[in-house]
Amino acid sequence: MFADSEDLARTASIVIAPILTALALAFEIWRLTLGEPHTTLNQAYFMDHWTLLAIMAVGALVVLWGFVSTFTSTIRLNGVVMGLAIAVLKLTAVVVVPVAIFGAWHLRDPTREAMLPSER
């Protein structure tokens, strides 16, 4: 499915970049609000702190680069028709696989929850 490790990295950046961006934003907001525990995070707050805007812009650009480079490299390696089909399948897998993993981690067995601890 992936031509090489660079192809895998380009496609994985679509999932990894938003996670890293959210973590970077959380740590930067934490750093900025250390002395102000009841800070309202609205649009004006983000506009006053350029670091938050820079973090969001870099994260958005990396995701955009991931999308565009995934399409272009797949088309370059497989031709237009097959490249578009494979790119769509790759991007679908990039979304579905993390959702499935998240769902599997949070899966609960309702029959086990109804049992007493001694019956498990």
Image (tube, rainbow, N blue to C red):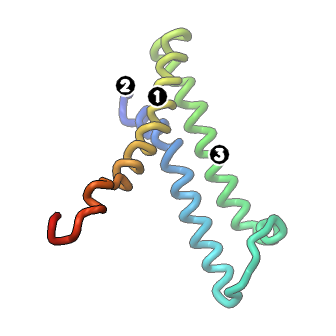
The one nearer the camera, 116 or 35, is 116
Quadrant position of the C terminus in the picture: bottom left
Q: Please report the residue visible at 51 percent of the width from the left and 16 percent of the height from the top.
A: 85
The one nearer the camera, 4 or 103, is 103
**Is the residue 35 above or below the residue 50 in the image?**
below
For residue 52, what is the image quadrant?
Answer: bottom right
Taking the image as shown, residue 108 lies to the left or right of residue 66, namely left
For residue 84, what is the image quadrant?
Answer: top right
**Is the residue 83 above or below the residue 90 in the image?**
above
Please report contact status of discs 2 and 1: CB closer than 8 Å, yes or no.
yes
Marks 2/1: CA distance? Answer: 8 Å
Residue located beneath label 3 in the image = 61
Taking the image as shown, residue 99 lies to the left or right of residue 4, namely right
For label 3, count other residues whose C-alpha is less than 10 Å away and answer few (under 14), some (14-19) or many (20+): few
- Mark 2 falls on what kind of element? loop
Marks 2/3: CA distance? Answer: 24 Å
Amino acid carrying label 2: it is Met
Q: Give the tally of numbered discs.
A: 3
Circle on res. 90: 1
Mark earlier in primary sequence (1, 3): 3
Mark earlier in primary sequence (2, 3): 2
Please report contact status of discs 2 and 3: CB closer than 8 Å, yes or no.
no
Q: Which marked residue is nearer to the observer: mark 2 or mark 3?
A: 2
Q: Please report the residue visible at 67 percent of the width from the left and 87 percent of the height from the top.
A: 37
Q: Please report the residue visible at 55 percent of the width from the left and 11 percent of the height from the top.
A: 80
Taking the image as shown, residue 118 lies to the left or right of residue 7, namely left
Please report contact status of discs 1 and 3: CB closer than 8 Å, yes or no.
no
Pinpoint residue 8: horizontal percent, then vertical percent: 41, 36
Circle on res. 1: 2
Quadrant position of the N terminus in the picture: top left
Amino acid carrying label 1: it is Lys
